[in-house]
Image: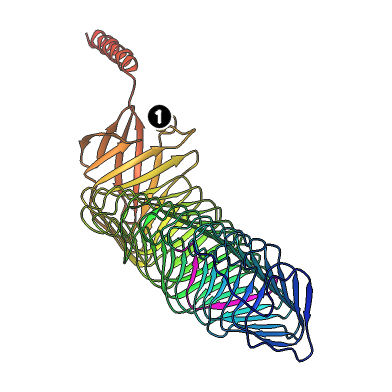
Amino acid sequence: MTKIETKSILAALTAVIVLSGNTAFAASLITDGGDVSVTTAISADPVWVGQSASNTNLTINAGGTLTDTSATIGVNAGANNNTATVSGTGATWNNGTGNLNVGFYGSNNAINVGNGGAVTAGLGELGVFSGANGNGVTISGTGQMNLSSDMIVGLASNTNSLTVQAGGALTSVNGFVGDSTTSGNTATITGANSIWTASGTLYVGIAGSNNLLTISNGGKVAVNAADAAIGTNAGASGNEILVTGTGSVLSNLTGTLYVGRSGINNSLHVQSGGLVSSKNVRIGGGTGTNGTTTGNGAYVDGSGSIWNVTGTMRVGSDGSNSTLQITSGGVVNVTGNSFLGYNATSSNNSVLISGAGSQLNAHALAIGNVAGSTGNIVTVGNGGALQASAIGVGGGNTLEIDGTATAVTTGAGTFTMASTGTLAIGFNAGANGLLTVGGAATLAGELNLNELPGFSFSYAPTSYTIMDYASTSGDFSSAAVNGNLCQSTGSDSWSCGSVNFTEQFTGSQLKLEVANIPEPTTMAVLSVGLIGLGAIRRRRRA
């Protein structure tokens, strides 16, 4: 590491210096220990707060202005815990289009902007070189930071942080929370009117791990012109965006929101009334995917938590084991088409819609979009609801409707099954899953009947409606109970262990008539009784 040295008008400060009146500098402002307070217009270039020393403080007070073309807080290794504060009406730090570095080689350095203070710069960087960890920027109150280039939280180091709170504002082109392979960096946008506006792309975890963007308590992040990506390149893992609380918003209405474009276990969480608005969505893969893409997920949980997608959604765009889970009253609305398992390499991905009030409202939904995309499953359970203009179940893929859940195709929407697709219906006491098809239902593949905990067909032989439809064609080629294949006993009839099932197409409904098969001992007793009855009749005839 190269140690940076310079000579300046204020070198190795150890006392409190107040720059006021008409003070102006044409040289650099280097503070190295002690405190500097700016209350007037100051020009200096560059500005360093803590060249090699620690605990240096630069304060720009109300009415004070500091102008330069580049500034660094915590220059050399060991230059730690240095702070610049811009606070008060008219307090301004103007770096032009130059860099504003927080933690060049040093650690735990900070900028605090608040109470009407303002900072302008080109590029904002936290943790510039390896080892410069734990540096932070806090923008609060009516404070603001305006960058003509990018904000990078963790350029080459870890555990750096950005906080925008209590009405603070940050603008940048691109935003990075964890650049390169850095890990544990965070950005928190919290409180009403707190906002980070990015006119370019937002990245949370390029190739590192456990980087986190939190939007809470009415905070907002607006990505206005490009993509947002959680886990961008191979090696990215455990990166996350969390949107939580009423009024908290992530808006990305122009580009694509990637949840794990590459990497593993990257996630989006929308909860407690948070709102996400996106154009296109790719959960697991998408354009630019490289390396392994698996286990990425989006989770929308709780009443009032909403994700609106104006374009298309793919769960498992390229990879495997990715998921969308909508629970406890969460809602996802998709204007365009939705795909679970988009490419031939997309397998074992899932959508879960569970809990009263939980909804996926889609246009057309394809479960297994192309040949080779298998093991994908949509599960609707516990009062959840799926609504789509059309639903298709590809070969080797499953739509499962459990208990009191419903799946509905709107208008004259269709339901289509491939020859190796599966429709699974769950049964519990007093209720079963129901598929309602507004248009034509084309049946094929397997009908799987699942006994949910506490329910058994042998104790509840009766008639069950499993589908409403406008018209049907085709039929199931096989049936199973709890995954165990049944034996065909004729057209639309199946023997499944201790019960028999008969399909009845009424013209508008598909019903299952369920009857118990008598136990062998019962059959033997019945046979003996019939033989005895026959003998009595013969004697009477004689």
**Image side of residue 421 versus residue 316, left or right:** left
Point 46% across, 75% down: residue? 253
Mark 1 is surrounded, within 10 Å at the Cα level, by few (under 14), some (14 to 19) or many (20 or more) other residues, namely some
Looking at the image, residue 462 lies above or below residue 346: above
User: Relative to the observer, which residue lies in front, 391 or 273?
Assistant: 273
Extreme-bottom residue of the structure:
22
Reading the image, the residue beneath label 1 is 458
Say which quadrant the C terminus sits in: top left
Label 1, secondary structure: give it: helix
User: Relative to the observer, which residue lies in front, 145 or 345?
Assistant: 145
Looking at the image, residue 166 lies above or below residue 344: below
Tell me which corner region of the image, top left, top right, bottom left or bottom right, holds residue 289: bottom left
Tell me which corner region of the image, top left, top right, bottom left or bottom right, holds residue 213: bottom right
Magenta range is 163-179
**Image side of residue 454 versus residue 247, left or right:** left
The percent position of residue 99, horizontal first and vertical second, equals: 53, 77
Extreme-front residue of the structure:
7
The percent position of residue 385, horizontal first and vertical second, equals: 46, 56
Point 48% across, 34% down: residue? 453
- Model colouring: rainbow
The percent position of residue 155, horizontal first and vertical second, equals: 49, 65
**Image side of residue 538 versus residue 384, left or right:** left
Tell me which corner region of the image, top left, top right, bottom left or bottom right, holds residue 141: bottom right
Looking at the image, how many numbered discs can be counted on the residues?
1
User: Relative to the observer, which residue lies in front, 351 or 197?
Assistant: 197
User: Relative to the observer, which residue lies in front, 226 or 481?
Assistant: 226
Looking at the image, residue 461 lies above or below residue 109: above
The percent position of residue 302, horizontal first and vertical second, equals: 58, 56
Q: Determine if the magenta segment contains residue 407.
A: no
At label 1, the amino acid type is: Ser
